Amino acid sequence: MTSTKRGLIVRCCIAVVYVVLAVCMFITGRSHTLLIDNNGAEDGSYKAIKSMSVTINHLEPSEFMKGDRDKFTIKGQTVKIHVESFDGMLDETYTLKVPMKEDSVLISIPKLAAGIEDAMIPFDLNK
């Protein structure tokens, strides 16, 4: 192998490593806004949790009462939500994957607890 071919191969390998690093940094550094919601359904299909503590990833726990909503910012695609009701009826950890294209999502804790599929929906903060 000549030195020019070897140099070309090394440059191509370095370019591939840079592209892979850029993609990894984009995915892990992407931030999302989570709106955590504790409201029941108007039709009564699921009910709001009376009072609970919610921990998002490794952030400080937040207390929610019936009807509360709060905003959190996370980095990365995966979010762990630990929910503990004050009456002891619920103590669960949920792992969700936030879609890459979404800047903000609304997560309904009562829907998560009830096992309803669309517990996480896109949300536009500009409306």
Image (cartoon, rainbow, N blue to C red):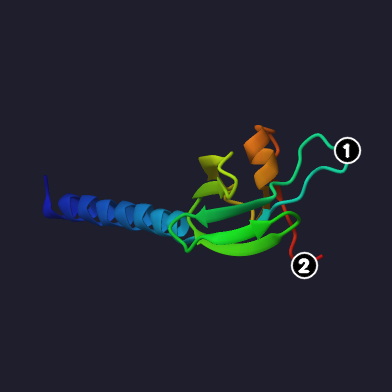
In this rendering, the label closer to the viewer, 1 or 2: 1
x and y percentages locating residue 106 in the rendered image: 69, 52
Q: Regarding mark 2 in the picture, which secondary structure is present there?
A: loop
Quadrant that contains the N terminus = top left
In the image, which disc is placed on residue 126?
2
In the shown orientation, is residue 75 left or right of residue 8? right
Mark 1 and mark 2 residues within 8 Å of each other at the beta carbon: no
Tag 1: amino acid? Asp
Q: Quadrant of the C terminus?
A: bottom right
Q: Amino acid at mark 2?
A: Asn
Mark 2 is surrounded, within 10 Å at the Cα level, by few (under 14), some (14 to 19) or many (20 or more) other residues, namely few
Decide: is 81 above or below 26: above
| Along the line of sight, the residue nearer the viewer: 85 or 98 | 85
Quick check: can you spot residue 32?
no
Q: Secondary structure at mark 1?
A: loop
Residue 90 in which image quadrant:
top right
Residue 43 is marked as: 1
Residue 52 spot, x, y in % from top left: 60, 52
Q: Position of residue 34 (x, y in %)?
A: 62, 58
Residue 120 is left or right of residue 10, and the answer is: right
Q: As rendered, which of 85 and 122 lies closer to the eye?
A: 85
Q: Which residue lies at the image location 66% right of the left edge and 53% below the top edge? A: 105
